[in-house]
Image (cartoon, rainbow, N blue to C red):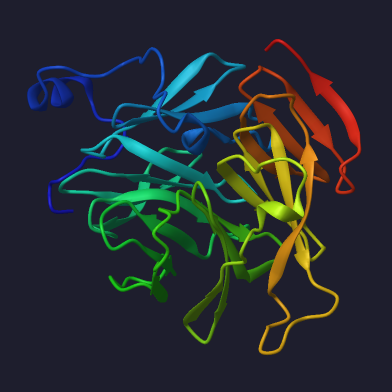
Amino acid sequence: GDGRWRGAAVAKPGAMADRNALNLRWTFGFNVDGAAGTLVDLTADGRQAVFYSVGHTGVIFDYEMRQQRLLQGHTNTISCAAASDDKKWLVTGDKGESDTMVVVWNARTGVPVRTIFEAHPGGVLSLDMTCDAMYIATLGAGLGQSLKIWEWTLQRDEPAAQSEITSKDVQHCVMFRRDDFSELITNGQARTIFWTWTDNTLKYYSPAISAKEFLTPIGRFTRSVFIPYSTQAVSATEDGDLLLWDQVLLPALHSRPTDRCAIKLLRMHEGAAVTVVSVFDNFLVTAAADGFVRFYDFKFRLLAWYEDL
């Protein structure tokens, strides 16, 4: 490397003491801003673990063994993280004025395997990794926002695809479609954008939302996700709702098969901002500021819930 960061490899105590005046052994607390974007479940293959961030340090916490593995290297506050479906690979991103980076880690050993420096001016607001860990999508944090897709296993500095985001509504969430990596969804507070990725080209469609179509106002968007094995997607709101998107039966002239429109507003949490909406196995999971976590099937039928967490 170029000396700008150090991974979490284990060194002899004497050698480490010679290099650093202080050695980080344990962390307390976690980053509150953007917490939903840096909390990642790493439970797999008999290990019960979760990733979260503390300042510019990443923490893999084994909550069964009560052990922390500290991932050091970022020089800015970690702003986002994601993992592959098998929990073997973890990717983290930060944002700041300089020396920003996206780092891919071996989630088992805590060893960094790839670093992308200055992926965007100002760093990264949000990122996602495909289920097979082959591709990473990143949303820029600075002016002139863009969406980029990286084939990180190839040793090249340029993204596989990229596109400027022309919307004035800053996009703060990006997610791949789990069953079709050629589709992505991003959202800001007021707009949701659907992306298609073919032949290293990104094309987008941002459906207009008419307040007259719904009986109640639509709150500001927090996060979005595709519903697997369907044409549907949902965007969560600060009012406790999910806005359901689906393909139209009678598409307009010049529309594409992937174009969607707002179909229905679903009340999931009474008056509390939905801060997490995610797909876990065959469940749609929501968590809100009221401390409630709820599990639904893909028809939005409530299956289980946990309250006052």
Above-or-below relation of 6 to 287 = below
- Residue plotted at (52% across, 50% down): 190
Answer with the quarter of the image where residue 307 lies.
top right
**Foreground pick, 272 / 178:** 272
In the image, 211: left or right of 70? right
Q: Residue furthest front?
A: 212
Residue 12 sits above or below residue 191 on the image: above
Image quadrant where one finds the C terminus:
top right
Query: Does residue 226 appear in this view?
Result: no
Q: Position of residue 39 (x, y in %)?
A: 52, 32
Residue 151 vs 7, above or below: the answer is below
Q: Position of residue 233 (x, y in %)?
A: 72, 56
Q: Is residue 218 left or right of residue 306?
A: left
Task: Report which quarter residue 204 is drawn in.
Answer: bottom right
Q: Is residue 41 left or right of residue 111?
A: right
Residue at point 21%, 20% (across, down)? 13
Residue 189 appears in the figure: yes
151 or 6, nearer to the observer: 151
The total number of labels drawn is 0
Q: Residue at x 83, y 80 (%)?
A: 250
Residue 224 screen position, x and y as percent: 62, 49
Q: Quadrant of residue 213?
A: bottom right
Identify the residue at image location x=71%, y=34%. 286
Provide residue 260's location: percent of width, then percent of height: 71, 68
